Image (tube, grey):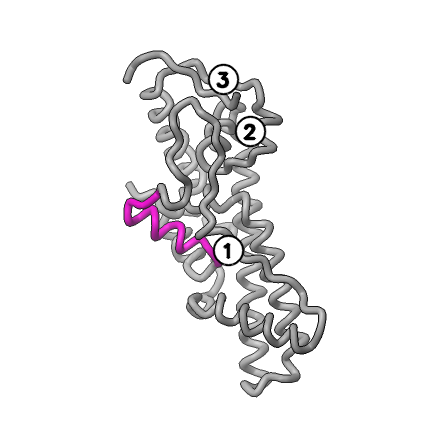
Amino acid sequence: MKYDYTKALLYAYPMLEELEASLEISVENKALLSYKSRAGALWDATKILEEISRKVRLEELKNLVSELLSLLTEEELYLLEYKYFRRKKVLFGRFGDFTLPFSERSYFRRQHELLSRLRGLFAARGWTEEALESYCKDLPLLPRIASEIGKGREQSIRKKRSFGRSSVQKSRSLSPVPLRPPRRTNTAMATAARQTRQMAMMPAVSKPLSSSMGGSGSAEVSVR
């Protein structure tokens, strides 16, 4: 079974809000600078609508993951935080004293079982792996993460942890580039050009899917 897009969504979850905000600013910039465009009003409007569609879909995916997280146990939430989300404030705050008293083998088995459960929860709401792939194929960051996972390069997204340690390491190469509103017209033009280059790798937006679719030695995992 492939879990590429399920995993990609988990890795990207802590960044979805920032990506959403970046697209919102990009839409505003394109609208403000449309009077300088030589491509024509129809082309400009189409590009703006494509980015609005991406923003809406990112928000929908963020809400989907948040809904599923509310169904998990504290142990399952810790496992996700430890492997995928890696938010220091959460690890050293909410889970500061949290430990999992089982072996390294059991840890990896439980991670696999949790991923299978999440995949089942996605599918029960109509979000199969194929549906996620279709829905995410032109969204910022997600196809790149899924591609790395599919090529067996998951460590390029998050460096492998030593079992029982808590170093939180993030991949700079896959971090979203924040898009900020321009302060002057000439700055705005440069900003819009940069954003156009950033978005150029994304294919034309497809019709959005509906959200209603359908070592056995003992060890402890601790954030201390």
> Of marks 1 and 3, which one's residue comes earlier in the chain?
3
Q: Nearer the viewer, mark 1 or mark 3?
A: 3
Estimate how packed mark 3 is, as few (under 14), some (14 to 19) or many (20 or more) residues with alpha carbons within 10 Å. Answer: some
Look at label 1 and name its amino acid: Ser
Counting from the top left corner in percent of width and height, residue 98 is at 53, 19
Residue at image coords 43%, 13%: 101
Q: CA distance from mark 1 to mark 3?
A: 39 Å
User: Which labelled disc corresponds to residue 91?
Assistant: 2
Magenta stretch bounds: 140-154
Quadrant of image for the N terminus: top left
Residue 210 circle label: 1
Q: Which residue occupies 49% across, 17% down?
A: 99
Give the label on residue 99, or none.
3
Residue at 51% in and 36% down: 86
Who is closer to the viewer here, 106 or 73? 106
Dominant secondary structure, magenta: helix
